[in-house]
Image (spheres, rainbow, N blue to C red):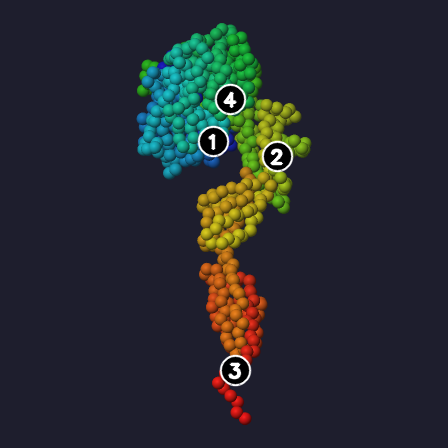
Amino acid sequence: MKKIYILVFLLMYVSITLFAQKEAYTWAFGNKAGLDFNNLRSAPFSATRLYPSAGTVSIPNLPTAITTNITTYEGCFALSNAVTGQLMFYSDGVNVFRSNGSIMSNGTGLAGHVSSTQSGVLMPFPGNSNKYIALSINLIAASTQVAYSVIDMSDGIGKVLDESPFLKNTRLTGHQGILGESVNTIQHGNKNDFWIIAPGSGTNSAFNAWKVTKEGVQASTPVVSLFPAGALEASRNTYIKFSPDGKHFVWCNNFNSTPFWFGDFDNMTGEFSNIQMGISRNQSGGTILGSYSAEFSQSGKYLYVSTGSGLNVYDYAALAANPSTYTATVYTMNGGDATSTTQNSLALGSLQLGPDGYIYATYYDRMKSPNDDLANLTNGSRRYMILITNPENPTNLNIYRLDNFLNAGTGGHVGITSFSPSWFTLEINGEASICTNPASNITESYSINLAGTSASRPTELRWYFDADNSSSYTSQTVNSTDMTLSMAGSFPPVSSVTTRKIVVKAYNGSTELADLEQSLTITLYPAASVSASDVSVTSGSTATLTATASTGATISWYDSATGGTLLGTGATYTTGAISSERSFYVEAANPACSSGRQEVKVTIRIAQPTIDVSDPATICAGSTATLIATVSAGANAYWFLTPTGDSPVMIGTSVTTPVLDYTTTYYVEAQNSGNVPSERKAVKVVVNPCTLPVNPNIHLIN
């Protein structure tokens, strides 16, 4: 946006889901300017006090200045390594630079503009730690659309992708209103996805919210929230900002009868509501037609709005309750120096909460706008910065001018590298679902990020690891340079699912800083266990497997010891037809614990054969008998002389006995191929002493 008589300002927004990391530790903005919060100045910096009184003050632990290759009037973004804080890349929304200042591969021609308020905005790609989504937007026009490109850092030096499915400058569609200069991103309420936000002005004024998931950007189906009534002038879109908790927003409009809009945002649905107009005022209380930049305090209680010549501070709750009559606290910020156009032409630029908890702003010559020469962006830049050290005390702010704070040959314009409010919340980070040890206590570490808390910066933290049931706490001293502090908690074994509340209270001396108190409810789970027995079935049958598990655990059945396919859940699982021995695996798990997988074998049981026999006809002594048995298919008959044990004396379903001289009992059983026997049945062969018949033709002769 080209402007001459009022401040211009950029807030670039980098949404990162990890709170206590260092993605926001290096900044790049303006005319080759930058700040490094990894390396603090070795000596206190002599600052000129603007409020509450004149004079100079030495402020320790301020960031060092660095020189970058960026040259932009407004929009810019940057990203640093999460662990080291070292700069990875930065951009003006048109070109993407590597940390060494060279252009990233395919990193030119993004759809932003050096005089677009939020020309470039960066967000993570959900579910992919090596990819980032760069949003870019041009000057306001009926044809302007939000565009996104994907930056891949998997090789360590980065490239902008331009091949399916990630084409450079992919446009977002489906919006209402006229877009331009205003775009932002905020984390979804589920903590996994994100929203891309672009307000549209004109007769169909609306907030447009596109959802971003691990599958990508839902580029054509935004959630549209229309303004309640009236229209906005379709040429004044400027900066949009969200509160640290993501529940409120502010959208500034420069040179407009509506200085700024504010209201509520539902980060679960993407809907805006309670949209109201706020009023900017000058030192005498008169209305100023227009505002450009804004920043929430860390607690979200206070809203800072810059009008270039002044700084308006609002109690957000009071403003929301009665915006038409609310009176802001006003600080005059214009001034001059030896080279300024006039003695009042120096103006407050962008506001941004730093990782040290202070609010930083650029301070530039607003009468030397790049309107006249966009190719010469050194025009109007300054090495000054403005610093606010107590943003939670708006009625008595400590405001300083930092003269020659930026490196020689560099300078700030309206824009400054700014970051997601996610980075500036006092939030407990750590495991919320804990698998306890059945035999002893388990220790878990929790951390808290103090960035953004300097307004009422604590000197002590008190950690309560069972706040609902105990007043016992662990005290932790906070040093002036501490950004992230950690504390270990000990948790006992539990036999059922149990909740505990961790509370961190902040103190400055003996004074409790109630606004900074944070809590985290954790769930303790008993160690998961599972037991199951092997099963035997006949070939071709199904098997029903049964398992028991510890309380609260879910039972899952798999086809392999690791990985494999989930076959089913629940205490029982019925297999398909089984024709050979097979192994299945069962696991019990709750949200925090797993039993590991236990093998359950299904073996094939051979069916017991059947046998039917009957006693043979009576025979005479000295004769043989034929014995016959009827057995089930696949079996044979085995004949014994004893009812149990012993070895068979004959095999077959039809056998002939040896010559028998007396009655004999045989015992027969059926056996199949698995040597599974039937019961033995007795077969009795009755032997009679038969006499020879008389032949009448034979006579005895004496």
Q: What's the distance in space between the residues labelled 4 and 3, CA to CA?
A: 125 Å
Nearer to me, 613 or 386: 613
**Which secondary structure, mark 4?**
loop
Nearer to me, 169 or 445: 169
Q: Are marks 2 and 1 in contact (CB under 8 Å)?
A: no
Instruction: Please tell me the numbered disc located at residue 247.
Output: 4
Where residue 112 appears, as percent x and y from the top left, is 35, 23
Q: Are marks 4 and 3 in contact (CB under 8 Å)?
A: no
Q: What's the distance in space between the residues labelled 4 and 2, CA to CA?
A: 27 Å
Instruction: Please tell me the numbered disc located at residue 499.
Output: 2
Report the amino acid beneath label 1.
Answer: Asn
Q: Write down the residue under mark 1.
A: 192
Where residue 567 appears, as percent x and y from the top left, is 47, 44
Q: What's the distance in space between the residues labelled 2 and 1, CA to CA?
A: 24 Å
Q: Is residue 603 above or below residue 1?
A: below
Q: Write down the residue under mark 3.
A: 694
Who comes first in sequence, dot 3 or dot 1? 1
Q: Say if residue 227 shows up in the picture.
A: yes
